[in-house]
Image (tube, grey):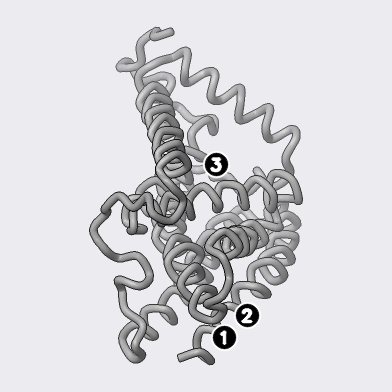
């Protein structure tokens, strides 16, 4: 099975950091002249994430790799690896973050103040970050973005948490768990090279490290899939649209 694990590790190491970067550069040029550039980019991104995920699923079906080994188990608290202080601290911070996401997701649709603040914040981000040109604008793009969010939540957690943590531990059994999760998180960060060194690689690697601790602490990637989806779905909020005209929106501070 080792050769199949190596194939996937090398793919993750090279494909997204290199191909993903240059594909995004091409997209930035195309989006200025092609009205359907975002839609095409979203579809290609979905396909690009599902291809390696299907490879992993095939490994599960035709080798000794199991779904349990890549995180498809019912959640159960495990403090043995990182200790109760680190594990429960990550749990608490993640819980607070989820509540904040839900607050803004709901508030975006019912509060004119939150709606306006999110739009203003997104406009400020766009002025600083070139990669935000990727965000959906039209209704069709926003619908496709939902599928991008679902795909990213499902596939990236399988690839970068479930599979990579297992594969690195399997290929290098003498490595400490901290080295394993840091290396897997770095690969997760490198997959976002197109977003820039700081906001892409570094910040995403830190998120990946937190997610890795959360994954091991819960012994399951299932909760992470949902959290990952919520984060990506939240990213589209704040784009200018007509929902502010909805009579259901109230002036909640």
Circle 3 SS class: loop
On the image, the x and y values in percent for residue 137 come to: 55, 41
On the image, the x and y values in percent for residue 34 come to: 66, 56
Disc 1 target residue: 7
Disc 2 target residue: 10
Q: Is residue 139 visible?
A: no
Badges 2 and 1: C-beta atoms under 8 Å apart? yes
Quarter of the view holding residue 91: top left
Q: Which mark is residue 54?
A: none
Crowdedness of circle 3 by 10 Å Cα count: few (<14), some, many (20+)? Answer: some
Residue pictured at 40% horizontal, 39% vertical: 88
Which numbered mark, 2 or 3, is in the foreground of this view?
2
Which numbered mark, 3 or 1, is in the foreground of this view?
1
- In three-dimensional space, the C-alpha distance between marks 2 and 1, rounded to whole angstroms, equals 5 Å
Disc 3 target residue: 137
Circle 1 SS class: helix
């Amino acid at each position: 099975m080792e050769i199949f694990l190596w194939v996937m590790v090398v793919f993750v190491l090279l494909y997204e950091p290199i191909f993903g970067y240059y594909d995004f550069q091409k997209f930035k040029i195309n989006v200025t002249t092609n009205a359907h550039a975002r839609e095409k980019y979203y579809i290609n991104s979905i396909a690009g994430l599902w291809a390696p995920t299907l490879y992993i699923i095939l490994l599960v079906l035709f080798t000794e790799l199991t779904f349990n080994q890549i995180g498809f188990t019912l959640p159960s608290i495990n403090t043995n690896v990182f200790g109760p202080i680190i594990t429960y601290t990550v749990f608490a911070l993640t819980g607070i973050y989820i509540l904040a996401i839900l607050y803004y997701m709901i508030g975006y649709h019912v509060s004119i103040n939150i709606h306006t603040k999110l739009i203003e914040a997104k406009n400020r981000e766009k002025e600083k970050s070139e990669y935000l040109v990727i965000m959906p604008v039209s209704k069709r793009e926003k619908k496709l973005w939902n599928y991008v969010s679902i795909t990213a939540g499902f596939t990236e957690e399988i690839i970068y948490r479930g599979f990579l943590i297992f594969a690195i531990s399997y290929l290098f059994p003498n490595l400490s768990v901290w080295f394993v999760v840091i290396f897997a998180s770095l690969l997760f960060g490198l997959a976002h090279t197109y977003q820039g060194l700081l906001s892409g690689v570094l910040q995403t690697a830190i998120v990946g490290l937190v997610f890795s601790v959360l994954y091991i602490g819960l012994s399951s990637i299932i909760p992470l899939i949902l959290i990952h989806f919520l984060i990506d779905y939240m990213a589209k909020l704040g784009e200018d649209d007509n929902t502010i005209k909805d009579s259901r929106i109230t002036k909640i501070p």
